[in-house]
């Protein structure tokens, strides 16, 4: 499901911010957002734009121009604010109700550095050198298919997209899941990758995907990791052992030239967080490690019996802490069990890296 960057929501609560006269803290879904004191009342409908939204260059959003119209986590008078609110009057006239997705109406785009990096890599791989020989051979379709393959294809439908929803999108989750145990792992700030193998008779089809595309050409970090770790052979062994038709792993690539290499790794590494064999999912680190026979690294485990606190604010506070890989704030935690999975992002990480 595509993310609602802008939606109609209700102001659930307004709280005083200590030392602030003109601003207050609004609660929207599970988010805490700083708003002007007299702009909203409890129960009002508003247009809520999530962090990672890029608003269009229009007069009503001109005050965001210095920030390149991007909504990110900020702190005002000591209060963390995630998102921005507008009155419903900024929308064209019409009837709107809570939950309506108005992202397209407002022409809001998503700030997505991983997709931008993917596109730059694809553009590089698809760069066409302006020479007469290439232009001549490009006239023949069979040569184009044989030699000038595209760098990417759409991500196959059977590959699950790796984005987890944030806890703030489930405002009642702490109450609904009270006492439920989750498996908690550290969320790593890298680039996500999926590696799959399909058995067709006596043949195998191997493929590699970024978060959004299947990557065909080899001159990139996705294939480098595959070659370094012999991932195809690992998947073939799994298919044979389980007599399966399909197996794939998903993980996070971290290291040089990936998200500024915040963990200061000397080389590229892959940390697996999902494994699927036919219709069976393996979400828990011990299960994945057992299946992969320790040939691949698994995302770090933080707690095997994590229980949500009473409020989302407390859950966000609990997500704070230092990364297990470097002396930096961890990006957050991912919680999973057999029914649910979601992430809790550490605001200290977002503030440090201006996200």
Image: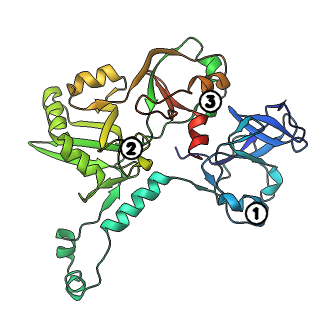
Residue 233: quadrant of the picture? top left
Residue 231: percent from the left, percent from the top? 20, 40
Q: CA distance from mark 2 to mark 3?
A: 24 Å
Q: CA distance from mark 1 to mark 2?
A: 34 Å
User: In this view of the protein, can residue 315 be seen by the observer?
Assistant: yes
Secondary structure at numbered mark 2: strand
Q: Which residue is mark 1?
A: 62
**Badge 3 element:** loop
Foreground residue, 314 or 337? 314
Q: Which residue is mark 3?
A: 170
Q: Position of residue 309 (x, y in %)?
A: 61, 16
Q: Which residue is mark 2?
A: 192
Residue at the image point whose x is 39% and y is 40% from the top: 160
- Residue 211 vs 248, above or below: the answer is below
Marked residue nearer the N-terminal end (1 or 2): 1
Residue 167 or 331: which is nearer the viewer? 331
Looking at the image, do the residues carrying marks 2 and 3 touch, with CB atoms under 8 Å apart? no
Q: Is residue 106 in sight in this rendering?
A: no
Q: Earlier in the sequence, mark 3 or mark 1?
A: 1
């Amino acid at each position: 499901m595509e993310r609602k960057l802008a939606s109609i929501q209700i102001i659930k609560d307004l709280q005083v911010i200590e030392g602030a006269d003109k601003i207050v803290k609004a609660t929207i879904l599970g988010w805490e957002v700083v708003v002007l004191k007299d702009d909203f009342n409890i129960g009002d409908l508003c247009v809520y734009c999530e962090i990672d939204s890029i608003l269009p260059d229009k007069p009503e959003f001109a005050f965001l121009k210095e920030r390149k119209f991007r909504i990110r986590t900020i702190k005002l008078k000591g209060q963390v604010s995630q998102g921005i609110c507008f009155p419903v009057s900024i929308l064209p006239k019409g009837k709107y109700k809570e939950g309506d997705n108005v992202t397209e109406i407002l022409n809001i785009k998503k700030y997505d550095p991983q997709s931008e990096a993917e596109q730059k890599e694809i553009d590089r791989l698809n760069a066409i050198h302006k020479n007469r020989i290439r232009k001549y051979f490009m006239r023949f379709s069979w040569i184009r298919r044989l030699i000038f393959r595209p760098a990417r294809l759409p991500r196959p439908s059977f590959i699950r997209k790796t984005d987890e929803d944030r806890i703030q999108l489930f405002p009642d989750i702490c109450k609904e899941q009270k006492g439920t145990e989750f498996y908690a792992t550290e969320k790593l700030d890298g680039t996500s990758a999926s590696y799959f193998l399909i058995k067709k008779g006596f043949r195998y089809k191997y493929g590699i995907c970024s978060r959004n595309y299947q990557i065909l050409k080899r001159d990139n970090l996705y294939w480098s990791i595959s070659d370094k770790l012999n991932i195809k052979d690992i998947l073939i062994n799994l298919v044979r052992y389980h007599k399966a038709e399909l197996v794939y792993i998903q993980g996070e690539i971290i290291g040089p030239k990936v998200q500024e290499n915040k963990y200061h790794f000397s080389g590229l590494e892959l940390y697996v967080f999902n494994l699927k064999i036919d219709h069976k999912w393996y979400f828990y680190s011990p299960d994945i490690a057992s299946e992969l026979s320790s040939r691949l690294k698994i995302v770090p485990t933080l707690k095997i019996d994590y229980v949500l606190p009473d409020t989302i604010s407390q859950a966000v506070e609990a997500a704070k802490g230092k990364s297990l890989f470097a002396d930096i704030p961890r990006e957050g935690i991912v919680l999973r069990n057999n029914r649910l999975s979601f992430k809790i992002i550490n605001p200290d990480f977002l503030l440090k890296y201006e996200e």
